[in-house]
Amino acid sequence: MTDRTHPTTDSPVLDAAAEFDRQVRTLVALGYPALSGRTEEEFAELVAPLRAEAVAHAGDPGQEYDAAASGRVPFVLVVARELAPIERTMSLTTLHGGRLPGFVDRSFEPGALERFVATEEAAPPSPDGVHLLFDVERGDEFCGVVPGDAMATVAERGRTPLTIEEGVALLTQVPRILVKNKCFSLGGSRSGDRRVPAIWISQKAPKLGWCWEGNPHTWLGMASAGGRRA
């Protein structure tokens, strides 16, 4: 049984099938089936078709990944907020080796979080609420870069910024991705104003907050991905 507080950490060598199974076990152990109104068996059936996609598109078998050092992850299984509300899923995250639950910052005024929706470029590909995010980067090179400029560079490279749900999924599956001075913005979710959501460390726990698109932070990069599949 996967520990609810400390999900199994990522393997340094990629075995896509085993990693997909681990991610499913992590979500089950954290209670995602109940959050989505399903039994564990029904939840497993919902995500099962994505296993073949993970194996086919995750990258070279045996390729090494060190999330904390490189800020890179081959793929992440994402559950949409329609199935698992962000306020609940964020509270299920922890730092690597930590026990304090993640939280949504009070700078999100009532109703604000619901207005942060996926941009056209970052729209989820699946109507059933689950998808895979591939070739994920924490975006350390964008620490100290104005978020608006970082998002433009990401787009020029044919990549896509992460949504809030995808950022929470990344942290849930790979807690070691979030480390001091290497946190990340989630430019794939916007609310029509200058705010850009981000996840960083506060009070020894992960925090979902936001920063202005024109304000750079030396400890905040721009997370991105190579693509999504459903």
Image: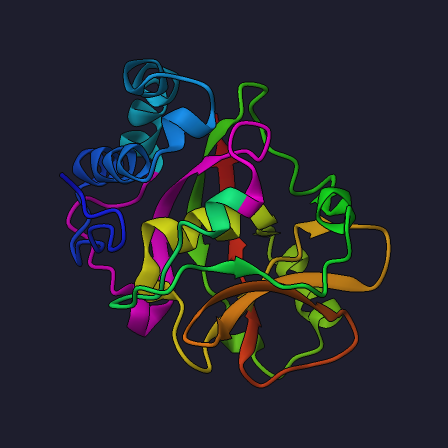
Spot occupied by residue 22 in the image (x, y as percentages of width and height): 21, 39
Residue 98, percent from left and from top: 29, 68
Query: Looking at the image, is 140 positioned above or below residue 157?
Result: below
- 65 part of magenta stretch: yes
Please name the residue shown 25% across and 60% down the image.
Answer: 65
Quarter occupied by residue 33: top left
Above-or-below relation of 118 to 175:
above
Q: Is residue 199 above or below residue 171?
A: below
Image spot of residue 107 (x, y percent): 72, 65
Nearest the viewer among 139 and 6 is: 6
Nearest the eye: 19 or 156? 19
Residue 174 position by quadrant: bottom left
Q: How many callouts does the rendering have? A: 0
Q: Can residue 226 be seen from the camera position used here?
A: no
Which corner quadrant holds the N terminus?
top left
Side (left or right) of 214 relative to 24: right
Residue 45 visible at all: yes
Nearer the observer, 53 or 85: 85
Give the magenta range.
58-87
Residue 55, image x, y percentages = 27, 32
Q: In this image, 89 relative to 1: left or right?
A: right
**Is the image coloured rainbow, by chain, by secondary structure, or in one colour?**
rainbow
Q: Which one is in front, 127 or 85?
A: 85
Q: Residue at x 71, y 62 (%)?
A: 196
